[in-house]
Image (spheres, rainbow, N blue to C red):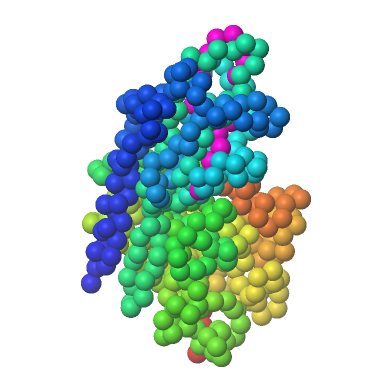
């Protein structure tokens, strides 16, 4: 039986994000918004409006600070574009942003505002925040040398109920609920087919509230912050949340005491294992999204990306459905055994067996030189290559665990590699040498 009904609501809500709007700043402080994209709000401030802005000292500079820009509860703002029209002197600009409406608190925290930048008159400035769920923003301008500001135009992206541009949804699978978040391409066309990118978080994203999964180290964040307007990276982005072990149906728990696999090849929460509920539920969601009633997924361009615990999940997903994914990125993960373990002895023998099952899928593997996860990452790469598979391995010098993620997702070279993968180009998988799955009987 198909499970498309479980996420029909979220699809309609996400399309709604692209066209939703509920007004801009109060018209007593700004001109009415002019025409902008359906998913944007635009406001023009005249010299008379700006003269009424509050005066504040920011970083030792005397500045004018706009009234709070807000479009209602739960509406995320980001991707600010600001144009200052002025004559004489010079102008510097900063944008403050927060989930809170308290300007005084925001100004105390430098990470909640962009650095001051010198702006040329009538030249648009693009400022993007790297934080999620921000519903408030302020424009901060410092004029010097007799500069006279005639007008400021501010435009920003807005999305209701979003975190990093991803709206919430639920998918029901075998008696339990999989929370997930999804973002459609900004210029979504229901007649087109798009790549589907799955992003799985590290252990910091484990939970049941559909919020923590949107942590900073997942690729989904960069798809919104860094690549939202780039046509070559248009895709449907999905973030399925790893549930806490207590919410995984017990029939999916691995064999062994307290649900631990025996022997201990994959010793983690019951959810993230090849035959575990989380992996199986996510695969079911992917297949429904790629079906005829879905939003338009290209079945030959389904990609997995994961970091840390999500990097460990990479290998579980590839084994769980050996014909589903066109390519994968494993960041600071491990293929077998415990985190940070070295695949030697029995673990190395088992790694050979499991690599033989997925070597037909191209994988890009990353680790930091100062991260103990590099042992398992490098061992997986070497084994894939030894068996004739397609794998690349990059070890970033003087880089710790979290630093690895920043080095991957914000590098267009690596993102282009992922989007170039196509299932049609991959070899067909051979017979599964271990069809019973990862758990011994």
Image location (x, y in percent) of residue 18: 32, 42
Question: Along the line of sight, which residue is nearer the eye, 319 or 239?
Answer: 239
Q: Is residue 83 magenta?
A: yes
Q: Is residue 391 magenta?
A: no
Image location (x, y in percent) of residue 201: 53, 60
Identify which residue is drawn at 59% across, 8% down: 88
What kind of secondary structure does the magenta stretch mostly adopt? Answer: strand
Quarter containing the N terminus: bottom left
Q: In terms of image quadrants, where is residue 266?
A: bottom right
Identify which residue is drawn at 57% across, 76% down: 268
318 relative to 74, above or below? below
Image location (x, y in percent) of residue 125: 52, 26
What segment carries the magenta color?
82-99
Image location (x, y in percent) of residue 361: 49, 59
Task: Tell me, yes or no, if residue 8 can be seen here.
Answer: yes
> Residue lying furthest top in this view?
88
Q: Is residue 180 left or right of residue 120?
A: left
């Amino acid at each position: 039986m198909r499970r498309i009904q479980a996420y029909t609501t979220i699809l309609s809500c996400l399309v709604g994000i692209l066209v939703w709007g509920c007004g801009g700043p109060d018209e007593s402080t700004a001109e009415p918004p002019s025409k902008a994209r359906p998913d944007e709000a635009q406001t023009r401030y005249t010299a008379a409006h700006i003269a009424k802005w509050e005066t504040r000292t920011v970083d030792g500079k005397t500045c004018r600070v706009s009234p709070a820009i807000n479009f209602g509860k739960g509406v995320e703002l980001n991707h600010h574009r600001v144009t200052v029209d002025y004559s004489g002197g010079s102008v510097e600009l900063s944008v403050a942003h927060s989930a809170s409406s308290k300007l005084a608190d925001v100004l105390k925290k430098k990470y909640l505002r962009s650095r001051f930048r010198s702006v040329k008159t009538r030249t648009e400035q693009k400022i993007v925040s790297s934080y999620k769920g921000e519903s408030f923003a302020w424009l901060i301008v410092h004029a010097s040398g007799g500069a006279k500001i005639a007008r400021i135009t501010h435009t920003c992206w807005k999305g209701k109920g979003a975190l990093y541009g991803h709206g919430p949804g639920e998918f029901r699978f075998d008696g339990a609920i999989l929370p997930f978040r999804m973002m459609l391409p900004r210029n979504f066309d229901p007649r087109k087919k798009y790549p589907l990118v799955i992003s799985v978080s590290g252990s910091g994203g484990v939970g049941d509230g559909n919020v923590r999964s949107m942590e900073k180290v997942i690729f989904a964040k960069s798809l919104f912050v860094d690549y939202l307007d780039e046509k070559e990276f248009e895709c449907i982005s999905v973030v399925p949340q790893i549930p806490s072990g207590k919410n995984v149906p017990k029939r999916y728990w691995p064999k062994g005491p307290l649900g631990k696999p025996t022997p201990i090849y994959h010793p983690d929460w019951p959810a993230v294992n090849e035959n575990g509920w989380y992996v199986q539920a996510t695969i079911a969601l992917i297949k429904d999204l790629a079906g005829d009633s879905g939003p338009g997924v290209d079945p030959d361009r389904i990609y997995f990306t994961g970091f840390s615990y999500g990097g460990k999940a990479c290998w579980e997903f590839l084994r769980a459905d050996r014909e589903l994914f066109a390519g994968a990125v494993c960041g600071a993960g491990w293929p077998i055994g415990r985190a940070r373990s070295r695949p030697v002895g029995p673990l190395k023998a088992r790694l050979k067996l499991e690599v033989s099952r997925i070597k037909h899928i191209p994988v890009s593997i990353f680790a930091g030189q100062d991260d103990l996860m590099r042992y398992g990452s490098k061992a997986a790469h070497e084994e894939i290559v030894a068996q004739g598979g397609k794998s690349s391995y990059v070890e970033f010098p003087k880089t710790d665990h979290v630093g690895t993620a920043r080095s991957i997702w914000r590098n267009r070279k690596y993102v282009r590699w992922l989007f170039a993968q196509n299932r049609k180009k991959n070899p067909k998988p051979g017979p599964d040498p271990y069809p019973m799955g990862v758990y011994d009987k």
